[in-house]
Amino acid sequence: MTEEPDRPADGRAWSAPAQLVLGLAAALLLAGTGLFLGAVFLHVAPANSVSRQYRAEIDGVVYPEFEQNWKLFAPNPLQQNVGLDARVRTVADGGATRTHDWTGLTAQDLAAIRGNPAPSHVDQNLLRRAWDFYDGSHNPQDETLTNTRGKLAEQYLKRIALQRIGREVDGERILEIEFRVTTATVPPPTWSGEAVPPAPKVRELPWWPVGDEDYRGLS
């Protein structure tokens, strides 16, 4: 009678090094999740000794991607249409610079939303919230900073635009970028008897330099 060869046990048998790696990865994932949830909790909780001592670190985790607000429970409909455009200045191989036409960033989002039964949250809110973040941290008269998050707001807005535009335009490297914001009050219904809204306001930001660091992590 011939003996049957040994059959492997049912299921996967992990080696000791593999189990160690999996255990460490799970521990790091749990620790990272716990730290993130703790930072968000301290951000929304009433001020206390811990949140005051580590305010800079907490803000670094929360802003700008995970900002907390409660408009879901008390919505305030937008009363203005805000359109954000960007244009860039490039340099050719010979050293000559060129300023390009405006690119309608808000227009791109609107084109992606219209006719879409399930529009992306990114298309609806990313650019709008980025501008709100910038506007809330800068003086509209001279674009000076009004709080410590102003530089972060500038970098956030710049990187959103550069992710769409790229590193080059017509084969020329981007040197600088400028933003233009047009704000128009939503007109009231004809039966309301309210006054006609003022003409749209245009606000141009200064030129910002563009370097390799601005593209770090962008796809």
Image (cartoon, helix red, strand yellow):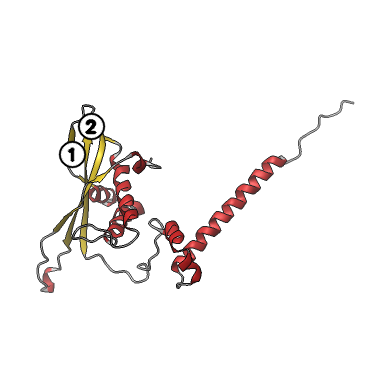
Residue 118 placement (x, y as % from top left): 35, 53
Crowd tier of the residue under label 1, counting other residues whose Cα lies within 10 Å: few below 14, some 14–19, many 20 or above: some
**Which residue is more in the foreground, 160 or 46?**
46
Badge 2 element = loop
C-beta proximity under 8 Å, tags 2 and 1: yes
Tell me, for residue 135, which label it has, or none: none
**Residue 130 visible:** yes
- 149 is higher (above) or lower (below) than 12: below
The crowd level at tag 2 (other Cα within 10 Å; few <14, some 14-19, many 20+) is: few
Position of residue 213 relative to residue 197, above or below, is above
> Residue type at mark 2?
Asp
Residue on which the image places disc 2: 170
For the view shown, which residue lies furthest in the right direction? 1
Q: Residue at x 14, y 68 (%)?
A: 189
Q: CA distance from mark 2 to mark 1?
A: 10 Å
The residue labelled by disc 1 is 100
x and y percent of residue 150 in the render? 31, 57
**Depicted 99 relative to depicted 38: above or below:** above
Q: Quadrant of the C terminus?
A: top left
Disc 1 residue type (three-letter): His
Residue shown at the point (59%, 51%) measured from the top left: 28
Q: Quadrant of residue 4?
A: top right
Q: Is residue 12 visible?
A: no
Counting from the top left corner in percent of width and height, residue 207 is at 22, 47
Of the two numbered discs 2 and 1 on the same chain, state the one appearing first in sequence.
Answer: 1
Helix, strand or loop under label 1: loop
Q: Looking at the image, which residue is at 14% across and 59% down? A: 201
